[in-house]
Amino acid sequence: MRAIALLLFAAGCASQGPDTDWRVTGGDPGNTRFSPLDQINTTNVARLRVAWVYHTGDLAPDQHGEIQATPIVVDGVLYATTPALAAIALRAASGTLLWRFDPRTTHDARRTDFSHVNRGVVYWADSRDRRIFFTAGRKLYGLDARTGRPIPTFGDSGSVDLAAGLSRAIGDAYLVATSPGAIYQDLLIQGMRVGEEEGSAPGDLRAYDVHTGAIRWTFHTIPHPGEFGYETWPAGAWQTAGGANSWAGLSLDTARGIVYVPTGSATPDFYGGARIGANLFANSLLALDAATGKRLWHFQTVHHDLWDRDLPAAPNFVTVTRGGLRVDAVAQIAKSGFVFLFDRQSGKPLFDVAEHAVPASDLRGERAWPTQPFPLKPAPFARQTITAAGVTEQQQRFRTLRSTFFAPPSRRGSIVLPGFDGGGEWGGAAVDPETATLYVNGSDVPWIATMREPAQLPPNPGAPRPGPAVYAAACAACHGADRGGRDRAPSLIGLSGRLSQRDVRLILDWGRGFMPSFASLPLVDKAALLEYLGYAVAAADTAGWRSPRKAASPYEFVGYERWRDTSGYPAIRPPWGTLSAIDLNTGEYRWRIPLGEFAALTARGMPITGTEQYGGPIATRGGLLFIAATQDAKFRAFDRNTGRLLWEATLPAPGYATPCTFAVGGKQFVVVAAGGGKLGSKSSDTYVAYSLP
C-alpha cells in the first residue's frame, strides 16, 4: 500500500539520491507538496542555517512589491520569478544567477506592478527541448530553459496574448494569470485571473500547444447554448457574464489523463441580480479530460456566490482507506474553512455533503440560493460564526451587522467569516501520502461586506469638485484618507512614479483585480482626481476617455473591510490563524495549533494568538512541516506528527509564499521567498535557502 501511495508524488520528485527535484510548484502534479527527502529531519532540523541568499535586484527600497512564487528545481537549476515579474534561473546549490528574462517594456512594467503577482513557472521537456512557461500581465511566455531566451516559434515571437481566443472581445478589461498551469503531454493547461466587477472577462480555461502556443481546446466555465449548465444562468449570460475563472492552480492525474480545475465566483462578486441561478461552473471543482477538455464530473461548492468564495488553491491528491479498500481521492480546501473530499474517478463525495438552508438576501432584485453544501466531515478548519461574546470590543457594532454564516452582503453590513481571503488561501495544503494526513493553515479573521446604492454624483454644471473631494467620495473607503492603503487596496502615495496617467485612467474606467470600475465618474472628476494623485492633466489628455455610464447594478460594494479593533487587531478573540493536521481516512483532527504571533501581545503575557496568513506548508519524509506565511516574518519547522515547533528563523520580510525542498549533490535544501508586502509589512526581493552545516 505504501508503494501505491508514493506514486502520488513520484512524477514530481525524482527518487532520493544525490539529486532530488521539485519539478512543479506543488511538488508533483497532484499538489501533495510532499518530499521523500529525510536528510533534514526531526533530530537535526534545529541545526539548519542559511545556505545562500539571492536578491532579485528589481525592487527599490521604498517600493511596494511581493514574491508569492514557489520555485521549481530541475536538474540542479532553480527557476523562479521576481517582484517585477522577471523569470530567473539560479544554481540551486549556490543561488548563483544563470539567466534572467525580463518581459517588461516601460508601459508593461507599470501596469503589472500595480496589482499582479506570479506564483511560479512551469517546466516542460522532451528528448530535444526544454522549456519554461510563465505569465506576466496578459502574456504567456515560452522560454528556452537553458538560456532564458524566448522561443521564437511559440506564439508571437515567444509569447501568447491570454486575451486572444476568449469567448468574446474584452477590450481593456483586467486579465492576468497568477498561478502556473499544468502540463499534460504536449499541452499547457492554463487558468487566469479576471476582474471582480461588472464587465469582467469570462473565465475560459484553455489548453495551449507547448510547441506553437496555439489553443488546442477551450472549456467554457460560463456555458454556451447547448452546453451542460447553460440553464443555471439567465438566457444569453455567456455573452455578458464574467468570472467563474480558475486562478488558483490546477492538479493533474497523469495516469488517468484528468485535470482537476478549481474555479472562482461569477461577477460582479457581491450582487447577483443580473445572474439569477446557481451559476455553473463558478465555485466548482471540475474534472476534465486533459486531452480534450471534456467535462467528466463537477461539484459546486457554493451556489450563486455572493461572498467571493473562490476555490482558492489547487486540490490535493491523496489515497484513503474506505471499507478496507484503497480509494484514490482529491481533497479541495475552501475559503470557508471546509474541506471537500471526492473519489478522483467518479466525483462521489467520500464524506457526506448536506444542503443546509441559509439566509435570504434583503437587497431588491437579488435571489440568494436558498441552500448551500456543508460537508459533514472534516469539521471546518476555521471559524464560520461568532457571537457577541466572541467580539473583543465592538459589541454595539456587532448587533447592527448580519452575522449568520452565509448571510448575503447587505446595506447594514454582513460579517464574512472566514474573511474574503479565507480560511484557506492560495498557499494550499500539503498531504502525507503514507498516512493520508492533510496539513492546512487557515486565517480566522472577520471581514465585513457592505452594499450601497451607487452614488448619484452631481453633473458639475459649474466648477468641478476639487481632487481631494473626489478622492474622499470615491477612493478613501478602500485606500484610506491618507492614501496610505489598507487591506487589499495598495498605497497611492507616489503613484505617479509607478503608473502612467493612461494606466490609472484605464483602471478607473475598467477596474482591475479587486477594484471595481469608476466609469460613472464625470470626466472632470477623473481629471481632478488624477491631478490630486500627482498627474498633470491637460485638456487634450481627456480626449477618448470613457464617458460616464450608468451602473447596471442597483447596488455597489463599499469596499474590502477587515473588521479590526481600535488597536488594529482582528475584532474577534484569538486564534486568528491556525495550522491543522486532518486524518482524511476518518475526517478527524490529529492536532491543531495557533500559527504566528504578535510580539507586543506575547510580551503582555497573551498566549500565542496566530496571525493572518498567505502561503502554505510542505511536508517531508523526515517528519517535518515547513511553513512561513505569517505576519511575524518567521519561517518554522514543525513535527508533522505532533505539531510541536522544532525550529524557526526570522526572514528579511514575511514569507508570503509556499516553500520547496530539494537535494543537489547529496545535500538537502529548503527555499522560501521572503517578499512581504501584504498586511502593511515591508517588501523585499529575497529568496533564502537553508541547509544543514
Image (cartoon, grey):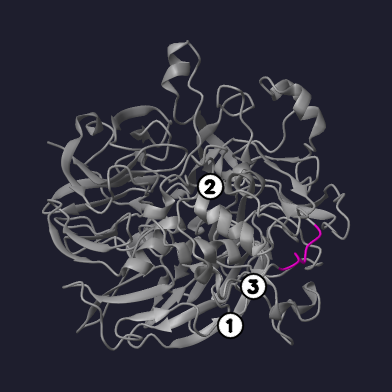
Using the numbered discs, state the Cα–Cα distance from disc 3 to disc 1 in whole angstroms. Answer: 29 Å
> Are there few (<14), some (14-19), or many (20+) residues within 10 Å of tag 3?
some
Using the numbered discs, state the Cα–Cα distance from disc 3 to disc 2 in whole angstroms. Answer: 37 Å
Q: Please tell me whether mark 3 or mark 2 is closer to you in this view.
A: 2
Q: Residue 310: which quarter of the image?
A: bottom right
Q: Amino acid at mark 3?
A: Trp
Identify the image quadrant of the N terminus. Answer: bottom left
Q: Amino acid at mark 2?
A: Ala
Disc 1: which residue:
169
Mark closer to the chain start, 3 or 1: 1
Give residue 297's mark: 3
Give residue 81's mark: none
Measuring 38% from the left and 74% from the top, which residue is drawn there? 140
The x and y percentages for residue 376 are 71, 46
The x and y percentages for residue 125 are 26, 77
**Left or right of 645 in this view: 315:** right
Disc 2: which residue:
489
Residue at disc 3, secondary structure: strand
Residue farthest to the top?
A: 605
